[in-house]
Amino acid sequence: MSKSIITPAKEFEDVLTPDYKDLVDNGPYNRSTPVTVDDLGSFREITEPHPHCAGCGVALGIRLGLASLPAPEDTIIIGTPGCAYFALTQSAVPYSCTAFGNQNSVATGLKRMLRVRHPDKVKDVLVMVGDGGVADIGLDYTLHSWFRRENIATVMLDNEVYGNTGGQESGMTVQGAVLNMAPTGKKFPKIPVFELSKTSGCVYAVKTTVASPKKVGTAIRRAILTAREVGPSYVQIYTPCPTNLKFSPDKSLEYAKEVEKTYYRYEEYITEEASEYLRGIGELKCC
Ligand SMILES: Cc1ncc(C[n+]2csc(CCOP(=O)(O)OP(=O)(O)O)c2C)c(N)n1
Ligand SMILES: [Mg+2]
């Protein structure tokens, strides 16, 4: 993508908000050194206000993701229905929302097409969707993209609920959790998608939470880089949902820190081939 593609058409300039112009002029694009999560606050990553609830972990996960793209001007994000849609449509990274669950199939076709269309340029395809999108309706498409070793990075924003549709349980909801539309509590444990990623072909996988922004940033950067050259990658981020899990919005990070001590302990999985590649391009320190 060239910067001119996101420059507003002259005819629309007067109807675009100053906020949007600021996103175009001061977004994370075409910088000599790509922005990182350390730069958050010094550039605009999405237009404001966004429609996410106060304390939304998904919105935070998206901000961290947008600040970690190795080449935002050459990245396309593929989504699916869910809360992530809202902030992602307010970024200036090209974004396409698929039918619910189809994201890894669409990303597969797109990545293959971009390789044909731009043989001399790397175009990163990043899937960024909710836990329901990955672990439930999209699970088979996700796993098969990993089995086929597609060169795409997949990020799950795990708020442990169907947030967007009012609080149904997802495969990633914890056992016993009572939700608006799961009043008797969930009967089975979280689906082990992180473990499945390791046995299904991913060359790089991380499990972390939004309470560790630098870990999220490094994970997304490495996931995109390994997906370019080595194979599929997966990042699973706990993104707390105060609205559906019914805690105070100012407690989101406390919740994330709490789960980091138990079932969301940080884990980084990396195959030998992927670590060799990352070391070769200076992204991993030598042993
Ligand atoms: C085929 C299809 N089935 C169901 C829906 C309704 N739907 C929209 S978003 C959503 C749940 C999304 O949950 P999740 O992926 O966890 O994202 P969140 O909203 O929690 O971020 C559902 C069931 C849909 N849009 N399309
Ligand atoms: Mg969800």
Image: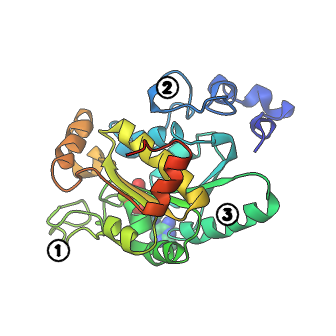
Judged from the image, the secondary structure of the residue bearing numbered disc 1 is loop
Q: Which mark is residue 111?
A: 3
The reply, left or right, for residue 277 in relation to residue 18 is left
Residue that badge 2 annotates: 39
Whether ligand 1 has any atom under 8 Å from the Cβ at mark 2 is answered as no
Residue that badge 1 annotates: 187
- Type of the residue with mark 2: Asp
Q: Residue at x 27, y 44 (%)?
A: 242
- Decide which of 51, 102 is in the foreground and name it: 102
Percent coordinates x, y for residue 51 in the rendering: 47, 40
- For residue 56, which quarter of the picture? top left
Ligand 2 is in which quadrant of the figure?
A: bottom left
Percent coordinates x, y for residue 120 in the rendering: 79, 54
- Type of the residue with mark 3: Lys
Q: Which mark is residue 21?
A: none
Q: Which of the marked residues, 3 or 1, is nearer the chain's N terminus?
A: 3
Percent coordinates x, y for residue 211 in the rendering: 29, 39
